Structure formats: C-alpha cells, structure tokens
Image (cartoon, coloured by chain):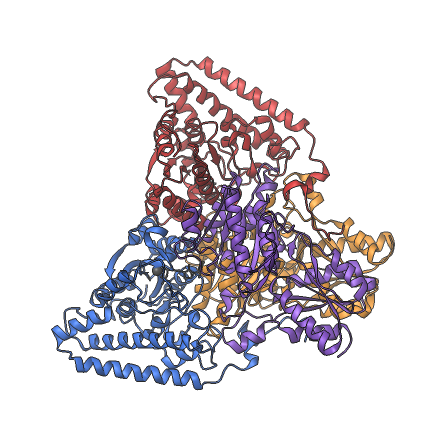
Chain colours: A red, B blue, C orange, D purple
Amino acid sequence: MPETKENSVSTIDPAACAPEWTEILKRMIFIRRFEEATEREFRRGKIGGYLHVYIGQEGVASGIITATRDRDVVFSGYRDHAHAILRGTDPNRIMAELFGKASGVSKGKGGSMHLFDVEHGFYGGYGIVGGHLTLAAGAAYALRYQGTDRICVCYFGDGAMNIGSFHEAMNMAGLWGNQGLCPILFVIENNGYAMGTSVERHSALTDLVTRVRAYNIPGEKVDGQDVFAVRGAADRVIGQIRETGKPYCLEAVTYRFSGHGAADILQPYRSKDEVEQHRHRDPIIILRNRLREICGVTDEDVRKMDEEANERVAAAVKFAEESPVPGGTELFTDVVAEHGPRQINQTE
Amino acid sequence: MPETKENSVSTIDPAACAPEWTEILKRMIFIRRFEEATEREFRRGKIGGYLHVYIGQEGVASGIITATRDRDVVFSGYRDHAHAILRGTDPNRIMAELFGKASGVSKGKGGSMHLFDVEHGFYGGYGIVGGHLTLAAGAAYALRYQGTDRICVCYFGDGAMNIGSFHEAMNMAGLWGNQGLCPILFVIENNGYAMGTSVERHSALTDLVTRVRAYNIPGEKVDGQDVFAVRGAADRVIGQIRETGKPYCLEAVTYRFSGHGAADILQPYRSKDEVEQHRHRDPIIILRNRLREICGVTDEDVRKMDEEANERVAAAVKFAEESPVPGGTELFTDVVAEHGPRQINQTE
Amino acid sequence: MAEKSYRDAIREAMIEEMDRDPNVLIMGEDIGVYEGTFRITAGMLKKYGSKRVIDTPIAEAGMAGTAVGMAMLGLRPIVEMMTMNFAIVAADQILNHAAKVRYFSGGQVDVPMVIRGPQGAGVQLSAQHSQTFEAFYGHFPGLAVVAPATPADAKGMLKTAVRGKDPVIFLESAALYGMKGEVPEDPDFTVPFGESRVAREGSDVTIVSYGRMLQLSLVAAEKLSKEEGIEAEVIDLRSIRPLDLVPTYASVARTHRAVVVQEQWKPFGAAAEIAASITEEMFDELDAPVARVTGEDVPMPYARNLELLATPHEPQIIGAVRRVMYRE
Amino acid sequence: MAEKSYRDAIREAMIEEMDRDPNVLIMGEDIGVYEGTFRITAGMLKKYGSKRVIDTPIAEAGMAGTAVGMAMLGLRPIVEMMTMNFAIVAADQILNHAAKVRYFSGGQVDVPMVIRGPQGAGVQLSAQHSQTFEAFYGHFPGLAVVAPATPADAKGMLKTAVRGKDPVIFLESAALYGMKGEVPEDPDFTVPFGESRVAREGSDVTIVSYGRMLQLSLVAAEKLSKEEGIEAEVIDLRSIRPLDLVPTYASVARTHRAVVVQEQWKPFGAAAEIAASITEEMFDELDAPVARVTGEDVPMPYARNLELLATPHEPQIIGAVRRVMYRE
Ligand SMILES: Cc1ncc(C[n+]2csc(CCOP(=O)(O)OP(=O)(O)O)c2C)c(N)n1
Ligand SMILES: Cc1ncc(C[n+]2csc(CCOP(=O)(O)OP(=O)(O)O)c2C)c(N)n1
Ligand SMILES: [Mg+2]
Ligand SMILES: [Mg+2]
C-alpha cells in the first residue's frame, strides 16, 4: 500500500482568509474572461467546431482542482477549458488549440472538445457524452496498481448519467473501490440541463447523487456556486479517497449562464427570467463578496484581477492568432505510434 | 387511458388450495423434465450451440407468468425454455427448435437462445446479456401507446444488471413510467452467479433490487424458491402495473442447480456442498410439500404428474427427432421482409 | 413539384407519415423542447405531443433498443441520432438486435424502424464527430442502409423507410441540409430502395457515389466537361444495402472506366465493395482499374487546414478520372 | 521449437509477458475464478492474483474503456472478450476512444492495450454469436487488427501486441484453439504486424486469406494440387491493419489470378478491400477478376445444415479457383 498519511492534502479552512482564496478568485475571473473571449473569437470565425464554455460553473472546477496535487490526474468532457486552465495548462496553448494552430495543446488536432495536457495531469477533453468515465475509472485503477497515492478526478454533466458507460464505469469503480483500488472523485456538474433537456426530463430520479449509491459509492451534494463549500468538500473527500482508494461522488449543483454551445442561441428550453435568477448566484460574485466582507479584499483588488485577466487573455488570443497552422504532414502523425505504419497499400 | 379496472387480474390466494396450484406444480415438474431431457439430448449431440437450462429456478417463471394474461408479452434472455413453455408454446416445437428442425418455433434458425412465439406473446429469447431490456421497455411503451392494458414482463439475470443497456432501459422505463407509459415488470432472476462470477464479485452493491431505486422504480425481493411467494407478489404488482402504467421490479432470489450452460462441467466457482445445500430448497419439492400438507395432494398424484411429464417430453423429443431439417432455401428467408431483396450484385 | 431544402424534405416526410399513420412516432435527444439541433423537428412536439415526439435522455442504446421493441409491437419509430457518430454507442442494439431479430425469430416479427441523422465531416468537429458509416452498417444483413443525395430522394426514401418492415439506417448529410431541389408534392411519392440512378449522363468515364459525395462528383463532372472535354456519367447509388450496381455496370460497359467516391477512410470502406463488384462483373470491359477517391486514412483532425486535407474534394475526383483515362 | 496448440501459444504469450513486465495485466469476464470459457487463462488468477487477473462484471464497454484509461497511465492491459461478438457493446470505447485518443491529444498518450478473443462460426451459436470482425475494425485508423492463423503467429503476434504502443484488436478463432504447430521457444520471439507471408508456394493461382480461413485455404490448395494439378500459392495476411499486400502483388505477378477467402458476409467485407487493392495495383497482370469466397449474406442460422450452407468451405474455394482459371 502506498504511504498516504504523511503527506496528506493541505486543506484550507473555508472560513479563514488564506491567501489561496484570493488566488482562487483570480483564477475564476480569469476563466470567465477566457471563456468570454472564446465566444467572441467563435463569432469572429477564428474558432470552429463546437464550443462549450464554462461560464457560470467556475466554482465547481475551481473548488476541486485547486484541492488536487500536481501528480493527480483529471478527466473531463467537452466543456473542458476551465479544467485545463486550473491544472496549470498554458492559456496561450489552449487558445491556440481552439484556433486550430500547431502550438495548441493538442497540436491543433483536438480543438475545444479535446484539450489535453498530460504534463499537467490533464487527460482530456472527450466529445462522446459519458465516454470518458470508464477511462477515468481505469486510470484510477492504474494509479493504485502502481502503488502511488495519486488520485483521479472525473467530471461529467447531469446528462451523462443516463448513458450506459456511466453505469459500467460506476459499478466497476465501486467494485474496485471495495478493494481499495479505485481512488477516484466523480464530479457531477449538475447544471440543470443536458443541452435543452432539464434534469426532470432526462432522469427518472432527479436526486442525482443518490443514484450512485446503487454502486456502493458514497456521495453528497454541494452548492457549486459557492466555491467555499466546494473546496471544503473537496479537501475533505479527496483526503479520504487518497487514503482509502475508494471512489466518492460530489454532485455540484450549478448553472450555465451561456447557451449549451455557441450555436445554442434561441434556448427555447428556458426563460430569460430563469437565467436572470441564476445570475444572482454568480459564483465569482459570491466569492468576491465573501472575500470583501470577511477578508478585506477591495473593489480595486478585484478590478486589478480583472484587468490582469483581460491582458492575459488578450495575450493568449494574440499568441493563437500569430501561431502557424499545423503543417500538412501533421495529418499523418499521431495516428499510431512513431508516425506509422500507414496502410502499406495506400495509394494517393 | 385504457379501461383497466373492470377486468383486473384474477389473483389466487397463496394460502388457498385453488386447483391452479396443482396446475402450477404440474407445469414446474414438466419444465424440470423438459430441461433434463435437453441436457440429455445435448450430450447425445442432438442439440448444438449453447444450452442454458432453468433447473432450480422453475418457481420464478412459474409464479409470474401464470399471473399474466394471454395478451401480455414476455421477453427473456437465453435461459428461456421455461418462459416459452409457461406462455403456452407447444413443447414439441420448442424441442424441435433445439434440434434445429424446420418445425421449431423459430424454424430452426434461432436455437435454444432464441425461442420465439409471438402468437403466445413470447417475444424471445436473446443471446446478448442485457440486450433485450431496452426492447422490452420499448414494447411496454408501445402497449400503452396503443391504448391497451397489456403489460410486459422482462426477465434477466443478476449479471445482466451491470451492462449499460440495463441502465439505459431502466432510466427510460422510469421516465416513461413517471408518465404512466411503461407498464413493465422487470424480473431479476438472481441465481447468485453470472456464469462463474458471484454477485458480490460482479455488483458493487449486492442488494440488487435496491439498485433500481436509482431509476425511481419500486421493487421488492421475493423468495424465488417459494412459488407461493412469487405468485402472490406477481398478482399484486402486475395488477398495479396494469393500472398505473408504471414499471416495477421483482428480485427473485433463486439458484441454478445445473451448470451455467451445458459446457460448465467443472464449476470451479462453487462447491458441491453449496449446490447440495440449495437442493434442499428445490422449488418443486417446496410446492409439493405444501400442497401435500395443506391441500391433500398425494404422492400418487405427484407420481402421475411426473409420468405425464415424462411422456410429454418423450413425445417432444420424438417429434423433434422425426421433424425434417430446414430446407436450404430457408437460409435466405427472413433476412428482410418478403424473402428479399438479396444484394442485387450478389454473385452465384 | 416544389423547390425544397433537404432539411424540409426530411421534415415533411416525417410530418406526412405521422399524419397518415398514428403508429409513426419520433424519438431522440433534444428533438422536442429544444426543437432539434438541426431544427429538423422544430414545432413537432407542439403538433403531436410528447407521446409521439419523445425527448430521450442521452442513451443511444436505449433509443435504438426501445425502438426495436416498439417496432416489434407494431409501432413505426423514427429515431433521430443527433449525429450518426453517437449511434456507435448503440451498435449492439442496431447490429445484433434490430438487424437480426427477424431472422432468429424465424420471421415472426417485423422491425419497421428508422435510425436517421447527419454524418460526415466539414465543420471542424474533429475525430469523434466527423465520421461516415456506410461500410460500417452496409456489412450487416438485415439492415437497409441508404444515403440520399437530393431533397427529392431524402423525402421519397424516408417515406419508403417509414412504411417498410425492416430497420433502416438513414444517413443524412448536415452539409446538404440547406441544399434545395425539386420535390414532388404527391404525399404518396416514395423512392424505392435498391434502385440507383444516373444523375448525369456521359460516355467517357463512370463516377459512382452517393450522399454528399454525389454532389461533389457532379461538380467535378461539370468541371471535367468544361475544362477538359471529358463527359463523365455520374451514378447516384442512393442505397448502400441493398446495393444496386446494374446501372453502374451498364454505364461501365459504355465508358470502360470507373471512379468511386466516398468520404471516409479508404481501407475497408464502401468504395472497396463497389470497386470489387464492378471488377467482378465487368472485368473484360474495364480499360483501367477502378479508382477510389476517399478521405485520408486518419482520425479527423480539428484544424481547418488539416480537415481540408483529410477529406476528398473535386481535385481528387478529377485526378482519379484523369488517372483511369491515362491522361496524367 | 516445440509443438504447441494455438490455445497454449496465446496463454504462454500472456504468461511470459506478465512475467517480463509488471505493467501487463489481464481482464475479462470469468477469466479468473471460472478459469476462462476456453480455459486460456486457467490457473492465471492463482499465479498473479486478483490485481493482475481481473474478473470483470458483464460490462464490455467498461472493460474496454477502463483498459484505455489504464493504458494511458502506463499499464498494458489485455482484455479478453468472451467472444468478440460481445465487443460490439464496447464499439464506442474501442472505435471512438482507444483508436483516436492518441490523435486528438496530439500524440500525448500511448494506448498499449490488446482486445483479444475468439470469433467466427461453426458450432451452432446462431446469429448473435457467430460473427467475424475484420472489416468492422479494419476500417478504423488508430487500431491495429490482426488475425493469426497458426500457433507461432498467435504467440508472436500477441507479444508484439502487448509490447506495442497502440490498441490492438487480436482476432482469434475458437475453431483453431486445438490446432497444433511449431512455436519458437525464444521468449523474445515476436512476429511484427504488417508483414504477410507465403504459407504455401504455387504458381497457378494466388489464394489470399488469414485466420481460420487460411487453414481452409491450405486444405483446398492441397486438394487442388492432388486432384487437379493446380498449384495454388497461399498468402497468409496475418494483419488486417496494417495490411501488407506486397507479397500478394508479387505472387499475382506470377500467377495472374487471385482468390480472396473470408468467412463473413460478402458486402463490405474484408475481401472487398483486398480484391480492390489487388486490382488497383496489379490490373495489367490479372487474367481474371479477383474472386471472393465469402459466407452467405445472412445472419447465422442455428440449424446445423443451414450453418454449413452459410459458411465457406473447401468446395467454394476450389470453385473460385476454377473460375479464375476458366476451368468451369
Ligand atoms: C453519446 C452522445 N450523445 C449525444 C451527444 C451530443 N451532446 C453533446 S453535449 C450533450 C448534452 C450533455 O449534457 P450534460 O451531460 O448535462 O453536460 P453539460 O453540457 O450540461 O455540461 C449532448 C446530448 C454526444 N456528444 N454524445
Ligand atoms: C454482452 C455479453 N457479454 C457476455 C456474454 C456471455 N455470457 C452469457 S451468459 C453470461 C452470464 C449471465 O449471467 P446472469 O445475467 O446472471 O444470468 P444467468 O446465466 O445466471 O441466468 C455471460 C457472461 C453475453 N452473452 N453477452
Ligand atoms: Mg448539464
Ligand atoms: Mg445469474
């Protein structure tokens, strides 16, 4: 068994004014500005394909990924920019990926849905709903198999809970967890909708986190708009996962302020009013207010963070814009190892 | 909404000595003899492919299918002989199917795993574990869509609960059930093993019926070796399903006395002793004893049932043996409707 | 006749069939409240109600499998796959259940169901979202697989699919949704499966294709005619299974040269079957080996420039025509 | 060299690789306590423990998907599919994840995993349990697909698969498990992918095949030699992807005639690709169109007599050879 006790997670007291909270606010603001920029660049035609932004949900990834260690690993779906950013991926290279440039994290081959940064423990970035859950469970198994105390975090949406691979992944994680061999945190990013289908319309049982009890996996709901709550839960359960090798599930109740994807303009499935209501619970404003009230963070501090974020994002856009597109031969690399073999009888 | 109240299910009081109970004993004995004969004929090389018999589990199908109506529909997996027999399928034609004969229920094209008898509401007979669950949920939807009060019964094993299609079928059934549009009884035939893998080794949570709560489907466990208990539960819940259009799940705890399939000789996953223990709870003996004690059924009555069963089974074997094999042109029929079209550019 | 888009042709076929037969229903992800990602089903939930326009959870196996069960019990479900890529998740339900249950039941059930949705590359959706599936499904007996290239065929073939007795894989192309064309008004206008057609007459070379690539082939044929005086006959296969190559054979008997165009990867792609069949049947007539124009043998990359390199375009078709005419 | 069965060759390859590399593990349904439905893994649970010999629930997508994740993190999982038919349930995890994650991550991960198991018809398992999958997988870039026909290849290619960096679909044949053959003893004996071999020399006609059909082809070739004096060269492709047809081309350059043998349905089957490629490359050398010998285009029936009619046998191969030699 790996030694886990000695270097246990450094938790931060949600009530304390640790400098880390300011850092988290900074990152959340950065994510927001970054996502707004991607929407802009999509409209400008600089970004193609599907684009799913994280606006409104920042508290979820921020509260959890900041509680992980450098050597932990993270899997996400296609709404993955924030996860990569929080893992420490260079925003320039994320933006370049969205622009389809050679300097992108995935060499321009993946795009928005397939960000990857293995060096920072970010293992993607997947486009098939629920498809990555089994991968994450296997990764968690591998981490214990190798005798490490690394853990795996796997993000997915409320809608992903209805696909078969969710079920198979959960049961296998539960079984392996019974033997202490599956240190994984499953994070349901419950933003209330799978595209245009609300939770009550896609899940027979709407209390989502209770569904994972069917796999002997414990879980709890957390207010995803309150990053204090998220981080507090994350610190606690990640420590426990690391120690026991057993899976755990957090349902982060959140809301996306933007459309499902850049093409979701009409949003016939929800009213403007509903969105407005939820904007009152903007995770960035909630954190800012608390830091202002309790820890003396000033409006000026926040303005500065915003400014810095804008500058950093502008730099990323510039970097992306100025980067070259992938060379034509890149088409054929990375299909299999060592740039080959291609089909031997391929003509062209 | 269909009229359901007026012709509600005729229930039989498990405590009473209704003649139906003698009939059920007869059928269970018949199934036992039939299955023993199939094992014999398999060893004689008359039956090919996979052969999965129902020996030890007779109480489950018998208690439930006798509570259904003629126009109800039943889906099963590959361990399907008993289900067909109980629906009223001609045993001759079942045995002929196992022999691969033209007179078989599925014209000899399906074999043991694919019995079908649509006239008697038996919709198969499927070989992919869990694959038929979605079909059954769709069938149940169709029955309500058409405004009838027919219901669907879907059988599957404990092992089938871990495959993705189980999950998708259950959630969809739960959702449709929330609208009263999915009159289906899911029956877990929990015989303790998926082939050689015991429930604790394949399911993270071993209390199987609680797993369906994740889909807002109510359920209960029932002693599958006690056909009184099974039938009692079936009468109650089938009435309720018919009335509400909502799914329900019964976990029938049972045991298979034979190997998983005819090839499962060594059975390294369980001891002889364990099997012996369970033989003490033979569903046929349990029913016989109760009918003897309470209702005055004599040993002579039972001997006669046995004899009749043996004769009937022998006749089925004879019928199967004497039936002709399918004609060669049968190869090409039933691929698509109306015997064609075959690929137009097919040579020869 | 009326001018209609490919999208509206599909939509109208569904509406007319739902009006005609109460057993027809549609199901899919976000086809109701959301009105469909490509808006094919816009307004239909309001018109037919939630019993006949079923918004499903994200559960493609569940959608396909429940449709099989519905079909066995007499309904005629049309399953919309948001894109056909997601139907891979339902492969078992389609290939091992829908395609085979008629057979292994000895013909006791009909399975009148349609699985339809867009496929193909072109808008930077990258590797998991850009595939085409003709060869994938075409291999399996028990299925019908069609890929209409025009609004008229989209409408007429979807009607045939809905009215049939077998599972149909109905492969649309998102890139064609906006394309307009003449569509007959007759509500009983149907286009049978297994009948290919000559989309353009010509005597120098035969180009064989279907779906979006058929349109590309027609553009290439016009260019060839204008710029090089080569008159290509273009065959629209329409159905992949059953596959009708009789008009192709007749054409090759005159042109002695053939080019097959498909979007997807070359190895074990649809063009292999078509080329092999042409060769088997017309060997003595061929003056050159049948050429295949295909996408590159790589997962689809995201970057626009790479995606363009990965997919076939007119120049490749023209190049292949030159090759089989020994004009290089 | 030692005489070994195909079954033992596979088993030994796994054992030797597990002994050599602690990152190699095996997972599958009933491979541990039950000892494997074909007893390939008998005794391995005891030897390696439950962490390295994982009995899984019935969850093929889960098996394949977790294996991808393990492989991305540095393990080398071997997934046993009880039969390859069940891997259809895992199609998305294999085709859309295992095959593509290297590409869409821009080459950031290796995916060293093997999916192996028996396929094919012959013992009355009927429609859902009797399929072969060369064309199904061969179409997808990012995968390697192999179908060894001999014990030596089974061992050598499985070792190559385990030691590689990419997902490998390793197609076995239950009908070959008992077959014996010489297998080199060297624990580092491997057989590379993408190198076909001449299994029998001959100068009159080239028969191309792989897996179980290769053995059938050899039997047919002997018969042809004895009974008709026709000397067939028989090529064993071994790999489907990458596909090496160079020795086939060389052979056809001498024989001018080719027959391709596959077990599965003809339309869009593996033989189509092989025939089309041979024709493309060797058109001027061919004296007859490449013939395909395939199974009938129907779901596999249960009845013994029908199953025999549905699958290819020596007479069909001999008939095809006669046809391409114009000896009918
Ligand atoms: C298997 C599959 N089916 C359908 C889709 C299309 N699709 C993409 S995102 C999405 C909704 C997912 O909702 P949820 O899981 O709640 O995540 P969210 O987008 O809300 O973050 C759908 C249906 C897909 N990508 N994969
Ligand atoms: C998808 C799939 N995987 C594996 C198999 C092989 N298989 C056939 S039966 C079986 C065990 C099923 O166990 P359970 O569901 O408990 O039913 P039981 O046999 O006990 O009645 C397995 C693994 C299969 N038929 N389908
Ligand atoms: Mg959501
Ligand atoms: Mg069982």
Q: Is C89 displayed left or right of C252 in the figure?
A: left
- Please provide percent x and percent y for residue B292: 14, 75
In front: A334, or B276?
Answer: B276
Q: Which quadrant of the rendered structure holds the N terminus of chain B?
A: bottom left
**Residue sitting at 64 percent across and 24 percent down?**
A318
Q: Position of residue A302 (x, y in %)?
A: 46, 17
Q: Quadrant of the C terminus of chain B?
A: bottom right
Q: Position of residue D138 (x, y in %)?
A: 62, 55
Looking at the image, the residue that sits furthest to the front is: D1
**In this view of the protein, which residue sits in the foreground, B153 or D84?**
D84
B116 relative to C118 in the view: left or right: left
Measured as percent of width and height from the top left, residue A18 is found at 38, 17
Residue C222 sits above or below residue D314 on the image: above
Which picture quadrant has residue B59? bottom left
Q: Is residue B241 left or right of residue A195?
A: left
Q: Nearer the viewer, residue D179 or C171?
A: D179
Please determine whether, in this image, residue A215 is positioned above or below residue D253.
above
Where's ligand 2: which quadrant? Answer: bottom left
* Numbered disc total: 0
The reply to whether residue C119 is in sight is no
Residue D321 versus residue B134 in the image, above or below: below
**Could one spot residue D56 in this view of the protein?**
yes
- The vertical placement of A332 against D215, above or below, is above
Image quadrant in which you'd find residue C70? bottom left
